Image (cartoon, rainbow, N blue to C red):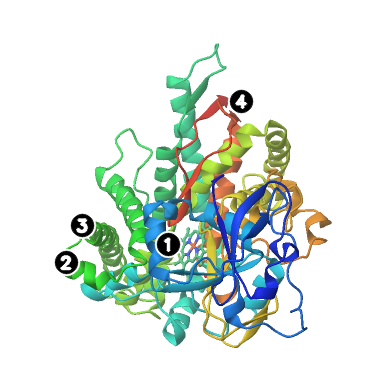
Amino acid sequence: VRNFMSVCVKAPHACRPRDMLLAAAPQRSFCMTAAGTVLGGNLERGKGGVKEGRKGGVDGQVRRFEEIPHTGRSGWLNLLKFWREDRFRHLHKHMERTFDALGPIYRENLGAISSVNIILPSDIGEVFQSEGLHPRRMTLQPWATHREIRNHSKGVFLKNGEAWRADRLQLNKEVMMSEAVKRFLPLLDQVARDFCRMLLAKVEREGGGGTGKHSLTMDPSPDLFRFALEASCHVIYGERIGLFSSSPSVESQKFIWAVERMLSTTQPLLYLPPRLLLRIGAPLWTQHATAWDHIFSHAEARIQRAYQRLSSSQGGEPEAGASGGRYTGVLGQLMEKGKLSLELIKANVTELMAGGVDTTAVPLQFALFELGRNPDVQEKVRQQVRASWAQAGGDPLKALQGAPLLKGTVKEILRLYPVGITVQRYPVKDIVLQNYHIPAGTMVQACLYPMGRSAQVFEDPLRFDPARWGSSREEGRGGGFRSLAFGFGARQCVGRRIAENEMQLLLMHILLGFHLSVPSSQDLETTVTLILQPETPPRITFSKL
Ligand code: HEM
């Protein structure tokens, strides 16, 4: 990290200290002109992060796309460097350093993929406002190829255009609308309470401390993955799968491993042509496809069961109202309404299952860690939660509404540890960012990890402060486009309401029952395996209250 050499590629007149942004420890850098001449120079950067955007070209004209600073012209050479230096695992840190070195906008070519990377909320807002009626993200080609070679339909994650919109409108009704949230919230609450009962039993059984003062230090991540899968199955299939029992099913554990394997093999496959790898039988591709097959067969078995359940109550195909008004989970609702074909229901439900486990289990690890190493913050959140819980009379919706610090905790965790380190869009019209011309159709990435830690964007950015989101303090710093962990607009995360409520409810019940502390409050090392994770899961001390 310290030896990082910045390569700043700019038009000749742009290679000035003023443009190079940032103070403190000088670093060696090369500064290349658009024509490729190495001019040399000192690049200064430091704790301030990205400072200032370029507001106008020297001559007042919008600059050409090619003039945007970049990290090296050849995508294939860059890719080689990334592999050699194992940079993919630390892509978030690479982005942070590159913004520090090159300023608030840069281009990067990796293999066949080119992007313009941005960090400032005003620029991000500009991009989202030009996303059009059918916004697009970067296609995860290994996932798409898997569907194509196995003849599976694609769900919203992988679709585009009108086909995406048609599915998405149906899914929104079952997972995003407030009426749907009211239906599934009690299910999430039940799972969160059961998790805490299981945790309490474990602390009492295995923990030390005096009578009634049990406490246990452990890595909670395996239990959090089980929690996330149990919660997803309950909401999506309307089914409990008993993962908190003393003998959780091996099949479910295999599902958790399969999702992990699918995610960790995606990133290295992203920059290679999957069909070529398929043809040569590359082990990485085989592992990826096998992981997906497992995820599909897990979902398939449950979908079959739910289908039989619903149709047997009607003596035929499931019909509207087959459940007699009982909530049958997202799957049951989609089947009853009959607006999506069974094939499309399968495709979308499988994506919801694949997208719903690690994405919530991992931020929960970070949340327990940050609450544990910030006891004052933890106590403030707990006080609010206690008061709200007492007022709510057991109603989980009311309890969450009365505890905005819980919502702030989740937002704060996702600011510091965004599950996806970027959100991508392809503007449908030409736009101007930092006074550079961006042609329609360019892939632009909003880089959430560096943004969340930039002093230009957040006051005291490394401080874990859930209250920052409730005050006008942050509003005064440029308003919107700063809390983007779930993406934005019509294409934002369709599982957002499930994830937010699931995480808030679990944290609420944990804070009501346990005091959290950490054996080590050192910063966690993080790594990217498509999603941002701790390098080693943190150990947490749970003390019974
Ligand atoms: C903290 C948890 C989560 C985070 C931070 C997260 C983040 C994201 C992000 C950034 C996107 C892309 C949005 C965009 O392009 O604007 C996305 C899309 C998606 N997420 Fe999540 N997600 C989370 C949990 C979930 C859960 C629990 C599910 C399923 C129940 C899920 C299913 C999906 C699906 C299917 C899409 C594709 C939506 C579309 O393209 O229309 N996610 N998520």
- Rounded to the nearest angstrom, the CA distance separating label 2 from label 3 is 9 Å
- Rounded to the nearest angstrom, the CA distance separating label 2 from label 4 is 58 Å
Q: Amino acid at mark 2?
A: Ile
Viewer-proximal residue, 169 or 332? 169
Q: Are marks 2 and 3 in contact (CB under 8 Å)?
A: no
Residue carrying label 4: 545
Left or right: residue 147 compared with residue 391:
left
Report crowding for label 1: few under 14, some 14 to 19, many 20 or more residues within 10 A (C-alpha).
Answer: many
The image shows a total of numbered marks equal to 4
Q: Taking 520 as reference, is 112 above or below it? A: below
The percent coordinates of residue 425 (x first, y second) are: 54, 75
Image point (61%, 38%), residue name:
370
The percent coordinates of residue 74 (x first, y second) are: 43, 71
* Quarter of the image where one finds residue 482: bottom right
Residue 311 visible somewhere in the drawing: yes
Left or right: residue 397 compared with residue 541:
right
Residue carrying label 2: 280
Q: Earlier in the sequence, mark 3 or mark 4?
A: 3
Residue carrying label 3: 283
